[in-house]
Image (cartoon, rainbow, N blue to C red):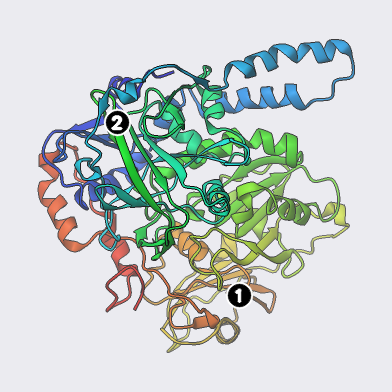
Amino acid sequence: MYKNLNEFIDVLRRNDELIEIDVPVDTVLEVSEITDRVSKSPGGGKALLFKNTGSAYPLLTNMYGSDKRIALALGVESLEELAERIYDLCSAVTSPKESIADKLRVLPVLGRLSKWFPKNKKGRGECQEIIHDGDLTSLPILKCWSFDGGKFITLPMVVTRDPATGIRNVGMYRMQVFSGNTTGMHWHMHKTGARHYEEYKKQNKRMPVVVCLGGDPAYIYSATAPLPDNVDEFLLAGFIRNKPVELVRCLTNDLHVPSDCDFIIEGYIDPQEDKVTEGAFGDHTGFYSLEDKYPLFHVTCITHRKNAVYTATIVGIPPQEDLYIAKATEKIFLAPIRLALQPEVNDLFMPMEGVAHNIAVLDIDKKYPGQGFKTAASMWGAGQMMFNKFMLVTSGGKNIRDLNDLMEAMNAVEIPRDIMFSKGPLDVLDHTSDVMGFGGKMCVDATDKTAEGFIHSAKEEVKIPDKWTDNTDLTDINDLYAKDWRVLFISVKKSKSNIAELSDSVNKYLDENAVEGINYVLIFDEIVPLKNISTLLWLAGGNCDAQRDSVVLSGKLYFDARIKAGGINGFPRRFPNVVTSDNETVSKVDGRWEEYGLGEFIPSPSREYSALVPDGSSGSAIK
């Protein structure tokens, strides 16, 4: 694998996967606007190396942001190659051993496994070649979006240790910079870092923390991976690299870090200190995550290697770089799911519109009645799949990455028979639940129902009018997908109507127009253009609580994807705005485009998405 990040950058150059920008670019908003345009271009664009950042260090963004680059980062021709390796490993370890010969055959596998464990190295590493002055403000840290609370470190590998067991964890938690030597530490209540923090708090001890930046790209991916608690992320990195991660001891605490990282930020958190207000931040959901209280991280030392490169990622409205990281996770972790948790699962797909946790699609090998609902319930109890909100289950080897195939399966669903509602943990970043981190879930069982003994009656033919009657409350209807997908997208004027009242009103309007054969109705605010199916699915996944904001009426499933600000459907919290660049930044990048050397002009996605910000709303939350 890669000796360091610069070696990976050279590989990107040779593969024509890198654009180097020599002119000065502001790390406040400008870098993010450029990266957002490039990452949303077909195929994810190219990685961007900003060489004139106003600091002593170049800045790399969009490093994983294409199918080719994520494979290059993980050292394989394709993600399937890595998936096969982990499947073979899991199969060898978990398969029944009926004879001595079978047991002996697994020994070489275990021998390889031992070679992937991280190894401590004496002395200093490349990451400690230069002892920095300890001031974070000298690094090219980004302010990504207009209403972010400040500058954020967005691609940190945060190393902590369980004070009771000594087991290490490497997580990725954004860090808002408050001063030259303090930041926030945004670990959610469900994360291992937060659990370690609570243990140190019980013991009334200061918590050592160290933050790594750069190094072999396999390290960064491993920090994002949904590993079981108490499994060392550097072990996964060793597996990906096919060689162990070499670790060196920090200078101001006894934690160990990869010797070839670019920057090491050492420090501590005092659990007895009051938490600090962190945020807002334009997040991977495409909405701002709003201000909240998180621990304060104190910097004690910064070291870096010679020719260090600062790494950052931009998140926001999909697609972004994290789409390709999610693709890797789908491939790599399907084998453990099948072998250890759900053997009936053929495939797992997390579409980009679901921003990792809102929407998941499974195809299963169905054998018995109710297996679709059983699989969903089991997955909701498994690791980070507990955060999923909407789950669609198909069977029979469906191509679940093809939208038309999915909608064909959805069209066979009988409503309400094949719909299951539940409640449970949600991602802290889910902004639609009444209680942070807890809300509704829905499974749509689109599996074959032969095992249940159900005989599908022929679906009634879809009928929609050539011309819809006027309605003062409805502002637009997209019926282009009605005949093939049995779905309508409708926008309505702003009102306080709850989902029951709204669905009843729309249902009467559909009856008035003699509409037949529709299964699904998605309702949006009048500011939402109903043209882009990807945007509509993203908004529906983001703005709906699966239970509170949906209702079954007259054999149709209604979803209320409106903004819930002001208590709509009883919503009690503040509601965030979507993430867009401000007009000044967009115009600045428009004017400098040729100067950057980025090739053909790419218009700003924010010009389209700014329509989703309500009139008169300025800030991270809707006024």
Q: Residue at x 85, y 20 (%)?
A: 97
Q: Position of residue 373 (x, y in %)?
A: 76, 57
Q: Badge 1: how crowded within 10 Å, few (<14), some, or many (20+)?
A: many
359 over 522 or under it: above or below: above
Q: Nearer the viewer, residue 357 or 594?
A: 357
Q: Position of residue 331 (x, y in %)?
A: 58, 35
- Residue 303: mark: 2
Residue 46 visible in the current orientation: no
Q: Position of residue 191 (x, y in %)?
A: 55, 50
Say left or right for 241 vs 345.
Answer: left
Q: Which of label 2 and label 1 is nearer to you?
A: 2
Q: Residue at x 41, y 38 (%)?
A: 210
Image quarter of residue 424: bottom right
Q: Badge 2: how crowded within 10 Å, few (<14), some, or many (20+)?
A: many
Instruction: Determine whether the residue tagged by mark 1 lies in a helix, strand or loop.
Output: loop
Instruction: Determine whether the residue tagged by mark 2 lies in a helix, strand or loop.
Output: strand
Kindly identify the amino acid type of the residue bearing the numbered disc 2.
Answer: Thr
* First reached walking from the N terminus: tag 2 or tag 1: 2
- As drawn, the residue found furthest toward the front would be 204
Q: Mark 1 highlights which residue?
A: 548
